[in-house]
């Protein structure tokens, strides 16, 4: 297509689409030599009984999956003690986030999110042409005033993750219940990391029509590549989301694994204990290296790097040692990295690399070596 014709085609697209950049292809996928601690996956294999159900599902490869995810929704309804009309199943919870933004926001509408929060929400709001209000939230309390009578009062819905990403902090469910009770807006409570936390908010859905809870099997049930997520809420809200969902949004393996996980959640007890134990061990070890770590109730840590360099410098330095961690350029997070909690060997490799880098920054300058403080020029 000629450049002129491409420009004509692009200029005919809606303004929001024109604002989006065409994504460049990502570089080559990191090879198996990388220790991947940047997207909060759970690195362990599926328990054997769940793996068997995944393999068995391959025999149904010629069939479309269940219409409306009915068998998976029924399994979730009996496991979690809700009616099946209160459940929607998604190709990961990110599919459900996308449906919520599409269903409940028109161009010019407002949506509010606790900040810092899961940045994918910002993009979803932008695609809808909505105004995205980021409401600063202290680690241990909700800004009730701002949510109930400030600019967020007119938001179509309020989004909060508990435990929160990227901080890992956890708010008591009683605080969230106070917000849900006092607000006349929909409150979307994203519980992607809740299985690593001390409590959850599912009980709220039978008390309030204005709460919608999201769950993911990517983090606590080691199924990120299989894509299973759920939404729980009032049938009037859930039914509207199901109404705009793509047909056959999940596949037969996702259904089989989802149903099997629901039947065998106990098979993950050791997995979850490992992650919580490692979370504490790595918190202490990082603190000894000069990091300041936010106490986490999720499967990752937000760590403020030692004085001298910023988070992106550390991310790059770790990557050179084949360790991948996340960095966010957002205000307030420039001096942090986010590190997923993986297997013990992965965390040992991360701590060894972090120790190495921290050590190299404090060793006095010598021939061929940069002194502390000048290392950021390496970026
Ligand atoms: C807070 C939060 N919500 C939702 C998701 C999406 O998870 P998935 O689509 O894998 O279920 C993530 C993924 O990182 C997340 O951090």
Image (cartoon, helix red, strand yellow):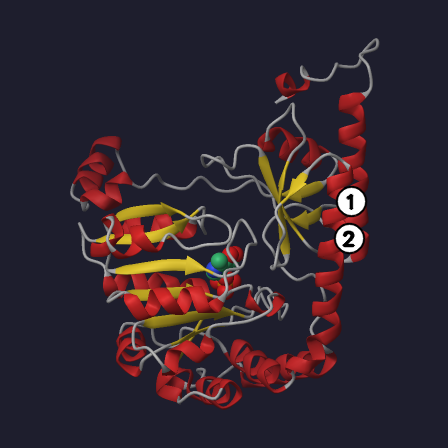
Residue 262 position in % (x across, y down): 58, 83
Q: Residue at x 70, y 84 (%)?
A: 49
Q: Position of residue 324 (x, y in %)?
A: 66, 43
Determine whether 59 is above or below 379 in the image.
below
Visible in this render: residue 195?
yes
User: Which residue: 76% across, 36% down?
Assistant: 289
Q: Which residue is mark 2?
A: 281
Tell which residue pokes out farthest to the top in this image: 367
Say if mark 2 contacts mark 1, CB within 8 Å. yes
Pick the residue in front: 116 or 78: 116
SS class of the residue under badge 1? helix
Q: Residue at x 35, y 46 (%)?
A: 134
Residue 91 visible in the shown view: no
Quadrant position of residue 187: bottom left
Tell me the CA gap for discs 2 and 1.
6 Å
Where is residue 25? Give x, y as percent.
48, 42
Write down the residue under mark 1. 285
Q: Nearer the viewer, residue 140 or 123?
A: 140
């Amino acid at each position: 297509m000629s450049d002129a014709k491409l420009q004509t085609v692009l200029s005919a697209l809606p303004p929001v689409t024109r604002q989006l950049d065409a994504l460049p292809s990502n570089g080559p996928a990191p090879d198996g030599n990388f220790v991947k601690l940047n997207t909060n996956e759970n690195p362990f294999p599926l328990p054997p009984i769940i793996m068997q159900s995944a393999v068995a599902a391959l025999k149904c490869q010629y069939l479309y999956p269940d219409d409306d995810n009915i068998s998976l929704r029924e399994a979730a309804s009996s496991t979690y003690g809700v009616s099946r009309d209160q459940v929607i199943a998604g190709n990961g919870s990110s599919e459900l986030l996308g449906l919520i933004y599409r269903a409940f926001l028109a161009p010019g509408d407002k949506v509010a999110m606790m900040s810092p929060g899961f940045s994918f929400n910002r993009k979803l709001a932008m695609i809808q042409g909505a105004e995205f209000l980021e409401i600063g939230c202290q680690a241990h309390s909700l800004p009730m005033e701002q949510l109930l009578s400030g600019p967020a009062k007119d938001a179509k819905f309020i989004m909060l993750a508990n435990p929160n990403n990227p901080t890992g902090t956890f708010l008591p469910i009683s605080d969230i219940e106070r917000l849900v009770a006092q607000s006349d807006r929909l409150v979307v409570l994203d519980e992607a990391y809740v299985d690593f936390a001390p409590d959850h908010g599912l009980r709220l859905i039978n008390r309030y029509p204005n709460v919608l809870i999201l769950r993911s099997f990517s983090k606590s049930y080691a199924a990120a590549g299989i894509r299973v997520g759920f939404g729980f809420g009032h049938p009037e809200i859930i039914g509207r989301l199901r109404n705009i969902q793509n047909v056959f949004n999940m596949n037969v393996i996702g259904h089989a694994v989802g149903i099997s996980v629901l039947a065998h959640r106990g098979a993950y007890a050791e997995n979850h204990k490992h992650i919580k134990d490692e979370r504490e061990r790595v918190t202490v070890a990082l603190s000894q290296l000069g990091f300041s770590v936010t106490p986490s109730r999720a499967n990752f840590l937000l760590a403020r790097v030692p004085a001298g360099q910023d988070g992106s410098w550390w991310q790059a330095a770790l990557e050179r040692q084949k360790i991948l961690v996340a960095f966010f350029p957002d205000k307030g997070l420039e001096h942090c990295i986010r590190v997923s909690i993986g297997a013990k060997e992965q965390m040992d490799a991360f701590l060894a690399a972090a120790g190495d880098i921290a050590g190299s920054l404090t060793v006095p300058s010598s021939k061929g070596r940069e002194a502390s403080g000048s290392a950021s020029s390496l970026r």
